[in-house]
């Protein structure tokens, strides 16, 4: 629950989880007490947070209750976050998927493959955080879904693959779960390159939401047709973006990360409008083009031995000026 005033852990826990419907009011009371204890020290272990042995055992019993689902616990917070988001404009819905690796928990059942190797076991959690784009205040979690990766069956055909649930559908499902922004609000789904999915963009259009994603696939695009042209010109998205001339520039601070030192980079910016064509063999909700704008920010002269910055973004938000980009 976001607020201009700072709530105590106890008040925050009541306000956030006090209305959870868990089938028994005692379960809701226990959820509130566990949440308050964790809020005092989020990085600590559960026994350390609960402090007493009896409270620790009670927390583990609560966690082992099969009648309690993740959705039941989180729904009150999701609703509060969306209510706060409905009062702001624009709101960024920033999504990412976290890998939870439980390879060392060899007795745990129901896990799936994680990581790059063959032996990793665990699951993933897809989270969407709502942020006020104007103030950059984090409003809370708007939706969250855990998922266990299922390996594709051997010998599966393209037609069979389309018939079964797929991991990639979580992006469009998240948009559907949150729904459209109440008028006159504006919600913008901000995603990484894994969301370069045509059906995800079309779902955003259906829900009257905007999107901003990092490009990953070299899709077919059509440039806006000039009146005197007979036929539209077809291009490839990534190739087109890299051929655009610079239309502006700025100094971009680059934070330190791992072995990389912090620095200031001069990046050039270009942009253009396109109509992204539906995939010829892939999934599409309809065989209609998606109207979008391409924005590229790249570093023409990086320091020696440093990999140049180069970002290509796709957005449904109109980009007519360098300031828009």
Image (cartoon, helix red, strand yellow):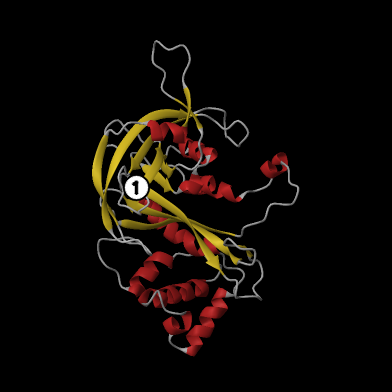
Q: Residue at x 32, y 35 (%)?
A: 270
Query: What x and y, as percent, mark residue 71?
Result: 53, 60
Above or below 78: residue 91: above
- Which residue ends up furthest to the bottom in the rendered image? 53
Q: 298 or 237, which is in the foreground?
A: 298
- Residue behind mark 1: 91
Q: Is residue 293 visible?
A: no
Above or below 284: residue 308: below
Q: Is residue 269 visible?
A: yes
Above or below 174: residue 144: below
Query: What x and y, as percent, mark residue 165?
Result: 65, 48
Query: What x and y, as percent, mark residue 78?
Result: 44, 57
Query: What x and y, as percent, mark residue 315?
Result: 40, 38
Q: Is residue 68 left or right of residue 269?
A: right
Task: Write down the quadrant of residue 323 in the picture.
Answer: top left
- Which residue ends up furthest to the right in the rendered image? 155
Q: Residue at x 43, y 42 (%)?
A: 180
Task: Write down the quadrant of residue 306 in the picture.
Answer: bottom left
Q: Is residue 94 left or right of residue 163?
A: left
């Amino acid at each position: 629950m976001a607020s201009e005033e700072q709530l105590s852990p106890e008040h925050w826990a009541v306000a956030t989880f006090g209305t959870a419907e868990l089938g028994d009011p005692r379960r809701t009371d226990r959820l509130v007490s566990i949440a308050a204890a964790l809020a005092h020290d989020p990085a600590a272990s559960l026994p350390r947070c609960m402090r007493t042995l009896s409270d620790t055992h009670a927390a583990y019993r609560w966690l082992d209750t099969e009648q309690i689902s993740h959705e039941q616990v989180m729904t009150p917070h999701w609703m509060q976050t969306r209510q706060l988001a409905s009062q702001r404009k624009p709101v960024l819905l920033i999504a990412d998927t976290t890998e939870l690796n439980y390879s060392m928990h060899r007795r745990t059942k129901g896990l799936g493959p994680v990581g790059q190797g063959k032996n990793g076991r665990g699951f993933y959690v897809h989270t969407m955080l709502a942020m006020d784009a104007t103030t950059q205040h984090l409003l809370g979690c708007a939706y969250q879904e855990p998922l266990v990766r299922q390996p594709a069956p051997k010998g599966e055909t393209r037609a069979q693959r389309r018939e079964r649930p797929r991991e990639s559908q979580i992006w469009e499902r998240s948009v559907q779960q949150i729904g459209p922004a109440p008028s006159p609000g504006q919600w913008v789904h901000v995603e990484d390159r894994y969301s370069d999915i045509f059906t995800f963009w079309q779902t955003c259009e259906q829900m009257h939401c905007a999107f901003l994603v990092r490009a990953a696939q070299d899709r077919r695009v059509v440039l806006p047709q000039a009146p005197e042209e007979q036929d539209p010109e077809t291009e490839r998205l990534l190739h087109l973006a890299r051929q655009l001339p610079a239309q502006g520039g700025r100094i971009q601070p680059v934070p330190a990360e791992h072995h990389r030192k912090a620095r200031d980079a001069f990046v050039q910016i270009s942009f253009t409008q396109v109509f992204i064509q539906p995939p010829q063999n892939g999934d599409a909700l309809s065989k209609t083009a998606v109207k979008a704008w391409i924005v590229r920010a790249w570093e023409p002269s990086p320091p020696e031995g440093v990999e140049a910055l180069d970002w290509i973004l796709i957005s449904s938000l109109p980009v007519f000026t360098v300031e828009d980009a």
